[in-house]
Amino acid sequence: MKLSIIVLVFVFNCFSAFADNGYRLWLRYDPIENVQLKQQYNNAISGVFYPGSSSTILAAKSELVSGLKGLLSRQLAEQQAPAANSIVAGTPSTAKLIASANVDLSAVGNEGYIIRTVSLNGKKTTLITGNTDIGVMYGVYHFLRLLQANQQISNLAITSTPKIKLRLLNHWDNLDRTVERGYAGFSIWDWHRLPGYLDQRYTDYARANASIGINGTVLTNVNANALVLTKPYLEKVSALAKVFRPYGIKVYLTARFSAPVEIGGLKSADPLDPLVQEWWKQKIAEIYTYIPDFGGILVKANSEGQPGPQNYGRSHADGANMFADALAPHGGIVMWRAFVYSNETPDDRFKQAYNEFKPLDGKFRKNVMVQVKNGPIDFQPREPFHPLFGAMPGTPLLMEYQVTQEYLGQATHLVYEAPLFKEVLDADTYSKGAGSTVAKVIDGSLDQHSLTGMAGVANIGNDINWTGHPFAQANWYALGRLAWNTGLSSAQIADEWLRLTFSNKTAFITPVKKLMLSSRDLMVNYMTPLGLHHIMGNGHHYGPAPWTNRAARADWDPVYYHRADSIAIGFDRTATGSNALAQYAPEVRKLYENVNTCPEDYLLWFHRVLWTHKMKSGRNLWDELCFKYYSAVDSVRLMQQTWNAQKANVDADRFEQVKMLLAVQEQEAVWWRDACLLYFQSYSKRPLPEGYEKPAHNLAYYQSLRFPYAPGN
């Protein structure tokens, strides 16, 4: 009997060591597998000296101690004074010993840090320091990342400071715990049990964000509910803010523009009405009594049915400035979304945000940021950069990405988004000549703005692994890393994330990193190749529906965008069409306006093209479209083969989960291919090229499919 128990315990321990449900994200701290390297680390780290007692320092100390214990398989002593090979973490103001190192911190600001091998009292030590406690915490996470990724630590000289000031997650979470465009379960905010019950997940959320430099979270949906501004909910928000505060994370809320009417008893929400202005001043002051370090508010106004200043004949600047004046005495900011379009404006939806906001440049208060989506339509798999970037030099612009995969296969497709993020950041606006990249617009260097920001619509839910798909964690990670350093490459971030989240084995890293880096392009090619866009199912945006033409608004219908007929396909945005290209600098316009020189990735974005048009490959447009769809499906099948070969290098739980999801992705890629090509074939009247497998169903079958309970809608 005893032998049986011993065997069971042994089996359980082995299983537990190798099983991984993904909850720990990239903060796994499992024992280092490389025995020689682990011994080097153990020899190089004798203990930890950690002066200071703030909540941030204590949280950073806890992270460092637990991280080292897991990675090195031993409990490190907390030293009263540093010995040889100590880790010393703190600010010069908290310990004279750290000040004696004479490390120049003038360039790292309030959040940056230095990690350096120095001599303190004649002893070799690893110093992690900054001007502030949060800078030290960021440095601690960087140091742990080095160990997790099996990097050398014997002679460190690292200086790091964030490129972007506000590094934010936007949660589209509702008070009933549903999540708009959420594909990983319900909201992690358990409003019903707050403020009394504080789930451990809140702390782990804060740890994960701090580890990648995210310093703000907008808790609620941009399609806002005014109730979150009432006393019972402010008490709940205050409880969350208290959990996040040690990790340097400020809380923000979304404000419903009509709140003075809905919860304030006023008859109007006119931003120029003194009664309305006073109501908001009092409401903002009340918020700060609950959350002294409240960051500010995010507003979606006069878009998709949301109320806003235009309801009263006022401008976006009038509305934003009303909030700005109420927030300014407390140090808060306004993030005013530029995602606007209207049924009353029949012009190309591409142009509407620019047309509304460009004339307002320079008319916003200093604590207002205009939050602009990466592209001009709506988070499509591939979009040209938004024309507002570079067009509003007098206004700080805040980048808005969508980390959650609303249009990128949702939580069933493996799509690494860093290449999408980088494609936009590296795009040249030419607003001040060559080299005026989008990255320079949003980091403030192009127009000398000190208020800068990057936000991502979160993909987080209460699934055990946070994001639904294990690889979707990489997109959350990439957002934080790029907001800290826009110069990082997609490959660097993928390599780092894989090492922290899965394994340091070269046999794993090399093929799986290649898989990640190709995933976004191949997804574009089995969904919306050659510049097709917005041909997803209406409402839920799940699956293909290029035939849809009965929505309440024309620009919710795919036919509005692809405009296919028997002669041609695509949206003409040149001077002969909507002339949207006129919103870009002449150099950008010149790149796209000629059908023969336009990059083929954007061909149907900007041009209406004959089915017989000869492509760079030598194929005509129809055959090229077929080639893109079919080759992308083949690439998904290669992804499956790559992953299946990794069974020995991945824990059983996540291996099987990803394997199943890749099978779903392959089926859905085939669905996209067959449904779209059958539909467009009904216009082109051309056969599929020889050698391609035939669709399993006819067009009517695909048009009949319905998904009334698709998630995130």
Image (spheres, grey):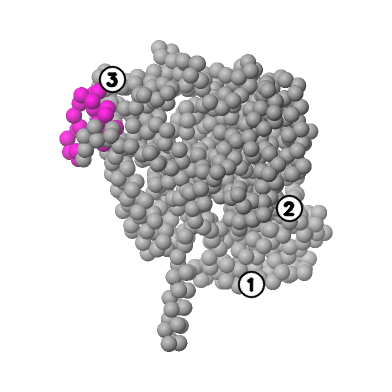
Density class for disc 1 (Cα within 10 Å; few <14, some 14-19, many ≥20) is few
Residue at point 75% right, 38% down? 286
> Could you tell me which residue is drawn at 41 percent across and 61 percent down?
653
From the top left corner, tell me how far across and down residue 595 is, in percent: 36, 20
* Dot 2 crowding, Cα within 10 Å, few <14, some 14–19, many 20+: many
**Element type at mark 1:** loop
Q: Is residue 396 visible?
A: no
Q: Which residues are magenta?
A: 674-695
* Residue at (55% x, 17% y) in the render: 355
Q: Which residue is mark 2?
A: 133
Which of 265/222 is in front? 265
Q: Residue furthest left?
A: 690
**Residue 656 quadrant:** bottom left
Query: Which residue bears the numbered disc 1?
Result: 75
Which residue type carries mark 1? Answer: Gln
Determine which residue is flagged by label 3.
565
Q: Amino acid at mark 3?
A: Asp
- Tell me whether the residue at label 2 lies in contact with that at label 1, contact meaning CB atoms closer than 8 angstroms: no
Q: Earlier in the sequence, mark 3 or mark 2?
A: 2
> At 45% across and 67% down in the image, what residue appears?
18
Between marks 3 and 2, how big is the CA–CA gap? 62 Å
Is residue 262 shown in magenta?
no
Q: Note whether 574 is above or below 380 in the view shown.
A: above
Instruction: Please indicate whether residue 209 sits to the left or right of residue 519 in the image.
Output: right
Quarter of the image for residue 409 reads top left
Please tell me whether mark 3 sits on a helix, a strand or a loop. Answer: loop
How many labels were placed on the picture? 3
Position of residue 592 measured from the top left corner of the image (x, y, whole percent): 43, 22
Relative to 211, say whether 426 is above or below: above
